[in-house]
Image: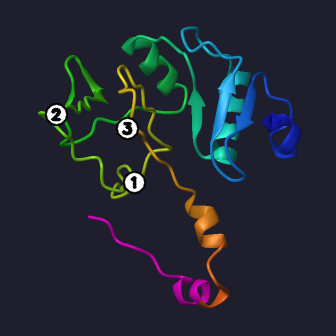
Amino acid sequence: MSLNAINSQTGDLPFDVTPYSVTIGGDVSGIDLRQPLSDEQVEGLRAALLDRKVLFFRDQDITTEQHLDFARNFGELEVHPFAPHKDGYPEVLAIHHNIDRPGQENGWHSDVTWRQEPSLGSILRCLECPPIGGDTLFSDSYAAYDNLPEAVREKVEGKYALHD
């Protein structure tokens, strides 16, 4: 079932989004990320992202420049202040994991939530994925909050976290 069939808020989209679960994730088809996007496509993707929270674009063989062009459709790109970046591309983080470099991203985290105005999101592009492992997991914090017992929701209502 596509997003158009389950979510009337987004209206007709110029592509298809197949949900991964009830609340989070959608597989996008009908868009070629090697090509510039129309305003209608960008608007539809933004609506789909806000609805599904995570979007997947399978089998998109794009260059770094095309990756950045796609990302710029959603706002100004950020340069991470301390993470290593790809040579010549300060907006692209270089994340490499292998037996000699197991990586530090394996713990649960949310990207740059400590910023005064956190970005809309991150756009991951996997160039080489192992046959097993290498998974990136996502959670729906909205659904987690909505499913808290009423007593817990009342206890945390109005509270906030300070990230520095």
Residue 40 screen position, x and y as percent: 74, 23
Q: Dot 2 lies on which element?
A: loop
- Pair 3/1: label in front: 3
Mark 2 or mark 1, earlier in chain:
2
Q: CA distance from mark 2 to mark 3?
A: 13 Å
Name which of mark 3 and mark 1 comes first in the sequence.
Answer: 1
Highlighted magenta segment, given as a residue range: 152-164
Q: Earlier in the sequence, mark 2 or mark 3?
A: 2
**Quadrant of image for the N terminus:** top right
Question: In the rendered image of this protein, does residue 143 appear above or below residue 156?
Answer: above
Front disc: 2 or 1? 2
Give the x, y percent position of residue 109.
36, 55
Q: Residues within 10 Å of mark 3 (few under 14, many from 20)?
A: few
Give how far apart the Cα atoms at labels 2 and 1 are. Answer: 25 Å
Q: Which mark is residue 4?
A: none
Specify whether 96 is left or right of 63.
Answer: left
Q: Quadrant of residue 80?
A: top left
x 42%, y 20%: residue: 68
Point 52% across, 84% down: residue: 156
Give the residue type that dot 2 points to. Answer: Ile
Q: In the image, 124: left or right of 74?
A: left
Q: Quadrant of the C terminus?
A: bottom left
Question: As drawn, which residue projects farthest toward the front?
Answer: 132
Q: Are marks 2 and 1 in contact (CB under 8 Å)?
A: no
Query: Does the magenta run of residues contain 56?
Result: no
Residue at 22% across, 47% down? 104
Q: How many marks?
A: 3
Residue under pointer 1: 110
Q: Which residue is mark 3?
A: 133
Mark 1 secondary-structure assignment: loop
Relative image position of residue 22 (x, y in whole percent): 72, 52
Q: Which mark is residue 99?
A: 2
